[in-house]
Image: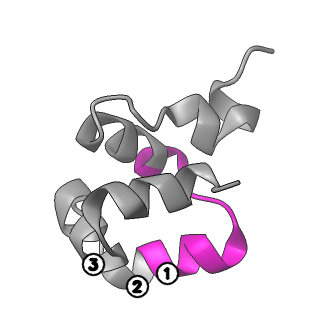
Amino acid sequence: MLSALDRAICIFGNQASLAKAIGFTQQAISYAYKNGRVSAEMAVAIERATNAVVRRDDLRPDIFGDA
């Protein structure tokens, strides 16, 4: 099963294209991928760029999930 970040990368084809679409560097995407966690800001940007196909609460349930 793909992680939410994997799904976002697949939608755009690669890390560099995702980074360009969300206004982050490819290095920031790579760092998040290796650590298994995106920032809250990146989660919001990914949700916006994917038209909520990948949701912020999927990327960061600790911040945006039901508490």
Magenta residues, dominant SS class: helix
Quadrant (top left/top right/bottom left/bottom right) for the N terminus = bottom right
**Among the two numbered marks 3 and 1 on one chain, the one whose residue lies closer to the N terminus:** 3
Please give the residue where the numbered disc 3 appears in the rendered image.
16
Q: Does the magenta-highlighted stretch encompass residue 59? A: no
Question: Label 3 crowding class (10 Å Cα cut-off): few <14, some 14-19, many 20+?
Answer: some
Mark 1 vs 2: CB contact within 8 A? yes
Indicate the position of residue 26 as horizontal and vertical percent values: 34, 80
Q: Is residue 20 left or right of residue 59?
A: left
Secondary structure of the residue carrying tag 2 is helix
Q: Look at the picture and state if 57 lies above or below 27.
A: above
Amino acid at dot 2: Gln
- How far apart are the alpha carbons under marks 3 and 2? 9 Å
Secondary structure of the residue carrying tag 1 is helix
Of residues 46 and 4, the one drawn nearer to the viewer in this rendering: 4
Amino acid at dot 1: Ser
Hey, which quadrant is residue 14 in on the image?
A: bottom left
Please give the residue where the numbered disc 2 appears in the rendered image.
27
Q: Look at the picture and state if 31 lies above or below 38.
A: below
What range of the chain is rendered magenta?
29-42
Mark 3 vs 1: CB contact within 8 A? no
Indicate the position of residue 3 as horizontal and vertical percent values: 64, 54
Q: Residue lying at the far bottom in this picture: please name it.
A: 27
Q: Residue lying at the far front in this picture: please name it.
A: 1
Amino acid at dot 3: Ala
Task: Identify the residue at horizontal 43%, vertical 76% (top origin).
Answer: 28
Which circle marks residue 30 in the picture?
A: 1
- How far apart are the alpha carbons under marks 3 and 1? 9 Å
**Among the two numbered marks 3 and 2 on one chain, the one whose residue lies closer to the N terminus:** 3
Indicate the position of residue 67 as horizontal and vertical percent values: 81, 15
Q: Is residue 42 left or right of residue 3?
A: left
